[in-house]
Image (cartoon, coloured by chain):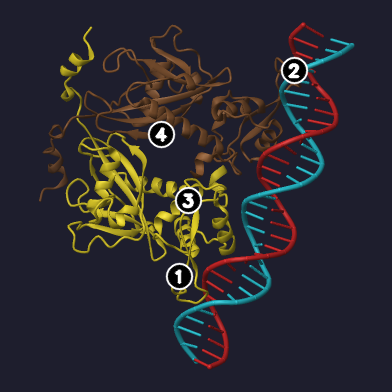
Chain colours: A yellow, B brown, C cyan, D red
Amino acid sequence: MTDERSFLDGYDPAAFPAVAVTVDVVALTIRDGRLHVLLVERGGHPFAGWRALPGGFVRDEPLDAAALRELGEETGLRPGEGPLERVHLEQLRSYGDPGRDPRMRVFSVAYLAFAPSLPDPRAGTDASGAFWVPVDEAGELAFDHAAILADGLDRARAKLEYTPLATAFVGPEFTIAELRAVYTAVWGEELHAGNFHRKVLSVPGFVESTGETAARAGERGGPKPRLYRAGDARLLHPALLRPAREEDVR
Amino acid sequence: MTDERSFLDGYDPAAFPAVAVTVDVVALTIRDGRLHVLLVERGGHPFAGWRALPGGFVRDEPLDAAALRELGEETGLRPGEGPLERVHLEQLRSYGDPGRDPRMRVFSVAYLAFAPSLPDPRAGTDASGAFWVPVDEAGELAFDHAAILADGLDRARAKLEYTPLATAFVGPEFTIAELRAVYTAVWGEELHAGNFHRKVLSVPGFVESTGETAARAGERGGPKPRLYRAGDARLLHPALLRPAREEDVR
DNA sequence: CTAGTAATACTCACCTTGAGAGCAACTGGA
DNA sequence: TCCAGTTGCTCTCAAGGTGAGTATTACTAG
């Protein structure tokens, strides 16, 4: 019986079949009232020329750090600074079926990111191939990335119900109408403006008033809206539920 | 510019640093009205002698299949047969911080399993070291398995609210009281029997009546309860919500 | 036979929800 | 400058879900 020290000294990691682990990021933002996802065009094989989710191999770093690093590299922004400071990042799930990557066994840990409107990645940086695409125009993607994107959208839609994450899509100060536009874009449904207003203000900790109003009203008229900040709630009680769909019961 | 075929032929997987991928399973069941988790006692290094979640290296198989295989090996039951047929299995999340395993970089994809009361694994099989432990007596676990267990419990508690998964903890026919006992055990809270009864029957597709009643009432009296089967709902509308807690808002 | 318990049904006050109406503030264009 | 249209925000009302409690009845163990 050896002790743990000598066991580890004699341990040979190369004795295992080669596998690799990547992170892939489903980064969502809202532009012009539509939900967009960040995609890259693959330069090398496999799937050269195809669109794909941004991602890459995990280095000597925690998984969360790898996802944030990839997001920063593709957007040309520094993680934790400026616009990326307010990004919400959470693990989505992992994908590892044999054959999902023709090179070798590759496990991918997918992440989901919610960001306020970010500058276009093309502008100047070396994040050459990244661009924002409306989610309903993503089309075919490399590997199993279309399935990952679909899972990410499901998660995002569900999270808006129970959590205040809609505030991650807007700036530090926002109007109720901007928040409603987030729900409309992500859920793809119109919401009753009056009821939404009442609901948001009645959930403790969802938003807090800044006491200010916007400098200008919207382009099409109406009073100057009041401005709000994100509150300190982590869960919405009561939740903002979508109307039940038929797919639910099945 | 090479084409994809010749690219793949020249690809050398061994050029990457060695990493490994495991699955670990948080298998939950209810025994004697208490929530239990399946644990194993580790035979080899590292963490020899410690308790751990059942799990192991992923072979040439999908992740889900690996989790089901591990669960079968540790319980001594055949996957997809007999008692394991009714097990609910879903991916929880992945863990991959450097240093979580002293041997090498090991990524673990954790799974969550809900099972009706299963036979004790000790009985006869070669699943020597596995046993059911009440979740509040799990104590310290190897690696980061205590954190994985905690995440699994959070997920299980939340899933009972929105999904009919409580039925995965009981037999094919069950009484409303048995279902209520599941909620009580998982949430650790007593529920108002009358309201629970009304609620369960009012959610479309949660349970359906068999038309039968149990052959005998409970040990302590009362009428013979009616028997129900799981319905075809995948989501509960409206949901069975727990009372909001203070930790929610924070 | 009795005391205790549990399954089920019912009541009632309270709250949340969806739908709609109303009012005032603001816009761009005539 | 005025006007028509749009929007932010408030309010009302009916419908339905919820928590707490009570009542009835059928069963158990002793």
Judge left or right: residue B192 versus residue B13. right
Tell me if mark 3 has few (under 14), some (14-19) or many (20+) residues whose alpha carbon lies within 10 angstroms of its own: many
Quarter where residue B76 is shown:
top left
Instruction: Work out whether residue B158 or residue A6 is closer to the camera in this orientation and state it.
Output: A6
Vertical relation: A15 (above or below) A169: above
Q: Residue at x 12, y 42 (%)?
A: B6
Badge 1: chain ID = A
Mark pair 1, 3: CA separation: 25 Å
The dot on residue A160 is 3
Q: Residue at x 39, y 47 (%)?
A: A152
Badge 3: chain ID = A
Residue B234 visible in image = no
Q: Amino acid at mark 4?
A: Leu
Q: Amino acid at mark 1?
A: Ala
Tell me if mark 1 has few (under 14), some (14-19) or many (20+) residues whose alpha carbon lies within 10 angstroms of its own: some
Vertical relation: B75 (above or below) A118: above
Badge 2 is on which residue? B221
Quarter where residue C6 is shown:
top right
Q: Residue at x 44, y 20 (%)?
A: B138
Mark pair 2, 3: CA separation: 46 Å
Judge left or right: residue B19 versus residue B245. left
Q: Amino acid at mark 2?
A: Gly
Mark pair 1, 4: CA separation: 43 Å
- For the residue labelled by badge 1, is the local secondary structure a helix, a strand or a loop? loop
Residue B12 visible in image = yes
Badge 4 is on which residue? B92
- For the residue labelled by badge 3, is the local secondary structure a helix, a strand or a loop? helix
Badge 1 is on which residue? A214
Q: Nearer the viewer, mark 1 or mark 2?
A: 1
The dot on residue B77 is none
